[in-house]
Amino acid sequence: MTEHEKIISPEDEYLGAGKSVAYGLQHVLTMYGGIIAPPLIVGTAAGLNAMQIGLLIAAALFVGGLATILQTIGVKYIGAKLPLVQGVSFAGVATMVAIVTTGGGLQAVYGAVIVSSLIGFFLAPYFSKIIRFFPPVVTGSVITIIGLSLLPVAVRWMMGGNKNAEDWGSFHNICLALMTLAIVIVLNLSRNATTRRLSILLAIVIGSILAFALGFGDFSQVSQGTWFQVPSLFAFGLPTLELTAILSMLIVTLVIMTETTADIIAVGEIVETKVDANRISNGLRADMFSSAIAPVFGSFMQSAFAQNVGLVAITGVKSRFVVAAGGIILVILGLLPVMGRLIAAIPVPVLGGAGLVLFGTVAASGIRTLAKIDYNDQRNLIIVATSIAAGMIPIIDQSFYHHFPKWVQTLFHSGISSTCLMAMLMNILFYHFDFVQPKQKLANKVLIKTQHEI
């Protein structure tokens, strides 16, 4: 092993084109449902027809791919250069639906996204300074809640994905999901490292084939429609600037920046690489720059996808070039609707079975971080307990903040942002304000010194 190989960071390891594409495809399959859901919801709320919604989805894939490449490969001052997948953020869906349904239309949404993203871009260096308020007690709580907040998504996928469908929660849906879960477990028993790392992809492929053989898969729509299409510029009209829409999206921007900061810290913990204020700032700039140009192609605000953090953890593949390959695949999917239709034909319960392991792995990574904390210090116990409980509130019941002001609903609609804010504020309260009596503080210093000497 050369000296260069000894000092290379895990995220900078290049695994070769073949492995990068295979592992990158796993990332695409993991986040595919999440990236197409926001344009589908917003497009439906805006009264678009099926063809127009298809354009929104293609734009989401195309821009998500470009944003992923920018975040992973990076240029000077832009891009965290970590294995982070980017896509349309779900945090802004409710706000965008409110804008389009109150007369603003998609043009007002696009204008608000551009302005608020540019503001976020210039705020990034200042926002990134909050890293000093993210010790393990905070990061562990945030990573844990990222996994817990994603588990309901996996459960919905296992039940069929659509509550209005006749087969929602049916026996065969859940059995199909459990079968996929069993395949993931069996593949991870293999002695072959490559098989274990590709277990999610292989399980989804095998699960889809078995579902089709059993009569549950429908791939009849794959060959119908266009095969190649370039996203049009401003396909839904030029953006318009409305103050109320911009202010609403600015709150969403702050929430997205908080969640992306948490995701950068989480993937840094998993990859075991240094994450400092500069890296967070570069990652946030990539987020905001991608969001600012997204409306040009007909897409919406971008953010890091938490579910893919779990894939990094479970596979142990930490290379950012793998995720960059996933970004290239997303771009191709945005240009080749036929490939998008093929992936969209994968039975949702199959994704649910794989997602159960993925999202649970994120929570397990957070628990591993929390295990390093000294719980003999009552303050740590209170921070973890309260912040995770606060994060579970919107996960348990989305209507909890229904009677609060709109900005409160936007800020706390996500368990991730709720936990992040609560843990950070409590950490500041307990460790950055001088509530400890001088004698007690001196005793603590003596105790720490003694423990260090031991």
Image (tube, helix red, strand yellow):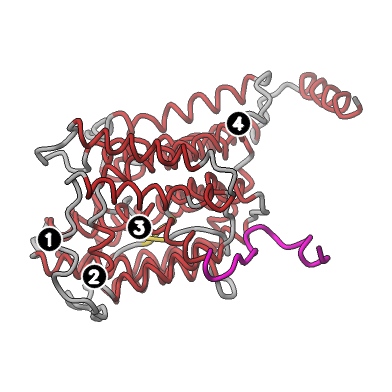
Task: Report the mark closest to the observer, 3 or 1.
Answer: 1
Name the residue nearer the viewer: 275 or 438: 275
Residue farthest to the right, as pictured: 453
In the displayed structure, does residue 253 sit left or right of residue 220?
A: right
N-terminal-most mark, 3 or 2: 3
> What percent of the width, then of the height, locates residue 266?
55, 46
Work out whether residue 179 can be spotted: yes
Query: Looking at the picture, which amino acid does disc 2 mark?
Result: Val
CA separation in Å, label 3 and label 4: 32 Å
Label 1's element? Answer: loop
CA separation in Å, label 3 and label 2: 36 Å
Task: Report the mark closest to the observer, 1 or 2.
Answer: 2
CB under 8 Å between discs 4 and 1: no
Q: Is residue 299 above or below residue 413?
A: below
CA separation in Å, label 3 and label 1: 21 Å
CA separation in Å, label 4 and label 2: 44 Å
Name the residue nearer the viewer: 319 or 72: 319
CA separation in Å, label 4 and label 1: 43 Å
Query: Looking at the picture, which amino acid does disc 4 mark?
Result: Leu
The disc placed on residue 338 is 2
Q: Is residue 69 magenta?
A: no
> What percent of the width, then of the height, locates residue 358?
44, 42
The disc placed on residue 370 is 4
N-terminal-most mark, 4 or 2: 2
